[in-house]
Structures are given as C-alpha cells and as structure tokens.
Amino acid sequence: MTSAAIFSVLLGRRIGLKERILIRESLNQVNVAGVVRLVRYIFIYTLTVEVFLLSSLPYAWRVTTTGRLISGTAFSMPFLPLITQALIFLVILLTTAILLVIGTLLFLVLEFSHALAPFSVSVKLL
C-alpha cells in the first residue's frame, strides 16, 4: 500500500479517505491525519538511503596491489584467485535471485485465492 501511495503522490493524484484508511492500517497508525506526510517521509528516506548506497557502490570493490579482488559481500577473499572470487560472487548473486523468484512465486501461489482474491489476474501478477 505504501508503494501505491508513493506513486499516487508522485503522479499528483489526491488520496481519498478510503486510501488513507488503508494506508493507516498498513502502517499501523492510530489516526488518518498525517499518513500522506508519513508516506512522503518514507519515500524521501528510502530514496536517500538508495542514493547513498548507489554512490558508495564504486568503493565496494577494489583491487589490491597484488591484483586480488576484495569484495564487499561481507567477507574479503584476497587469498583466493581472481576467478574463484568472481565465481563466489556469481553464486551469491544467483542464489539471491533464485530466492527472490521462489519467494515471489510461492506468495503468488499461496495467496492467489486468499489475500489477492479481490484483484484481477493482471493485478495479481503485477
């Protein structure tokens, strides 16, 4: 719901009472007042963190003087050959992608006729 509200705010669409109530419930707020402002704050905070992390990406990888690659993947591997480091990083990326796809498909299968029941098939797949 927060993502939908962010897109509505970005598109300049007014958020009605029904949407505000849904936002209030999804963000566990007591009052309807200020939920749009809260959504804006969430968007600005998320955007700031993403930009910061994106700007620090070039510093996540660096080559040492011996030609070894030190990764930013929670541990450094300067003692391994470069090809091995690249393969480990590839395995990490592939595992992450596979877990994301499996989780998304599992959610779709399990909630298709429950939480996603009121939506059309195109919205469910979105």
Image (cartoon, grey):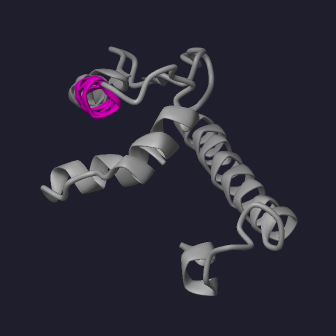
Along the viewing direction, whichever of 30 and 91 lies nearer the viewer? 30
* Residue at 39% from the left image edge and 25% from the top image edge: 67
Q: Position of residue 122 (x, y in %)?
A: 56, 84
Along the viewing direction, whichever of 90 and 55 lies nearer the viewer? 55
The image shows a total of numbered marks equal to 0
Q: Is residue 77 left or right of residue 6?
A: right
* Residue at 30% from the left image edge and 25% from the top image edge: 34
Along the viewing direction, whichever of 32 and 5 lies nearer the viewer? 32
Q: Residue furthest left?
A: 12
Q: Residue furthest bottom?
A: 121
Question: Is residue 69 one of those drawn in magenta?
Answer: no
Q: Is residue 85 above or below residue 49?
A: below
Q: Position of residue 18 (x, y in %)?
A: 44, 52
Which quadrant of the structure image shows residue 38? top left
Which quadrant of the structure image shows residue 114? bottom right
Q: Is residue 95 left or right of residue 25?
A: right
Q: Position of residue 55 (x, y in %)?
A: 20, 27
* Residue at 65% from the left image edge and 38% from the top image edge: 88
Q: Is residue 29 left or right of residue 46?
A: right
Instruction: Look at the image and give the residue range highlighted in magenta.
Output: 34-48
* Residue at 18% from the left image edge and 58% from the top image edge: 13
Q: Is residue 65 above or below residue 26?
A: above
Main secondary structure along the magenta-highlighted residues: helix
Question: Is residue 42 one of those drawn in magenta?
Answer: yes
Q: Is residue 20 left or right of residue 121?
A: left
